[in-house]
Amino acid sequence: MNAFGYRGVGISVEGDNEISIELNGSPIDIETNDDQTVFGSALTFGEFESPESLARAVVDTQVGLANPMIDLGDVSEMSEASGLDVRRNVAELSDADRTKFRDAVFLLKERGEYDKYIKFHGFTDNLGHFGPAFYPWHRVFLRNFELELQNLSPESADVTLPYWDYTSANVDAAGGSAIWREDFFGMNGYVDLTWSGEDGTEQKWVLPGYEGLRGRIEQRDGIRRNPFSLTSRFVNPQAFNDALRHRDYRRFAPAFEGPPHGGAHVTLGVGGGNDQGNFATAVNDPFFMLLHCNVDRMWAKWQDLMREDWLADNPGQSYPATQLAEDYHWDKSDVAHTAPHTVHAARAMPDRHNLTDVMWPWDASKSHEDRPDSQMVTDADRRIYRPIDTLNHHDLGYTYDNIDPTGFVA
């Protein structure tokens, strides 16, 4: 599949001539849509050189309408993504796409592969949190999960990981929740998920029992969330603004890992034995993936802001390929930020958090000598990832339909 998307317009082409166009996640007819003309006649892909040119035709038509179906904003802020997987807002997915994603997650769970992600996160602790590798580590974690969903079956080959914008109330047309649904991953409180498995038998969502980092995790059915309003936002957009305004990674990183990211976790389920209150159980709730997909989207937004700042300060120059790595450093004036973990510099980053450190668990090592043996990576999962290898999400094969947070004020 070849795809292109920006500002709410999504174009995908499968095969030689199968065109799909979406506006804000909803499919549209390529001839007309009610009284608002999108195209005067049916199109074939052969009339356009690429999905990009087709998308631009949609945008050009929308710009000319008195009441366009989408708010294009400044269309010069185009984010070209030809050939990349496009991640979209879960609240704006069509029923078919939401169901396809849900069914892929259920199938991964049924085949026993979902549970390794629970354990990966459970053992990671400070190796992927509380330091600069928080964003790179979760970027790799999510991308591997997404690719595994795509490789499950032909039906899931075009599944992408949606993001949950928790600064929005996410209300559907009927005034109910667009995301906390019985036909998705359940609502609030204690959720027992069941589905029809590959062989037609009933399957149940079960938290696996395992020997965790800080004690035994007991097996139990279902997902445990706090009671919360199904149509309330979890985080005020101002918290996004405050974090994104930091122009130094050593300030942005903890600012966003804190209240904007942490606030969603806390409201979703910290306390009372709920899943989000424990590294060992947080990923048991599939919304963990959607929550962190939004975190990754905001890191991508911050990186774009840094790029815009650099270009404004260096008129007429090309953005250096090394600049994202330089922006990553916590303290650009201190060489200790690049110190390997074997060097006990006073201000060196923690183990596995330096720019060229190898990130656990994908190297299939033990996490720490004093921890339980957490070598759980199979040969298929084994790969060397370093923070420096993750700084451009396009290099990992995906992008977002929109990297602007709700309510963002520059």
Image (cartoon, grey):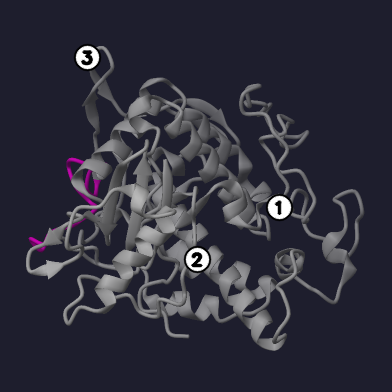
| Among numbered discs 3 and 2, the one appearing first in the sequence | 3
Q: Is residue 30 left or right of residue 258?
A: left
Label 1 is placed on what type of residue?
Answer: Pro
Image quadrant assignment for residue 199: top left
Instruction: Give me the residue at 36% from left, 61% from top.
Output: 55
Q: What's the distance in space between the residues labelled 1 and 2, CA to CA?
A: 17 Å
**Tag on residue 387?**
1
Q: At label 3, which amino acid type do we have? A: Thr
**Which residues lie in the magenta part?**
173-189
Q: Secondary structure at mark 3?
A: loop
Q: Residues within 10 Å of mark 2 (few under 14, many from 20)?
A: many
Q: Which mark is residue 201?
A: 3
Number of the label disc, if any, that sits on residue 41: none
Cβ atoms at labels 1 and 2 below 8 Å apart? no
Identified at 42% across, 65% down, the residue is: 263
Whether residue 212 appears in this view of the structure is yes
Q: Which residue is mark 2?
A: 298
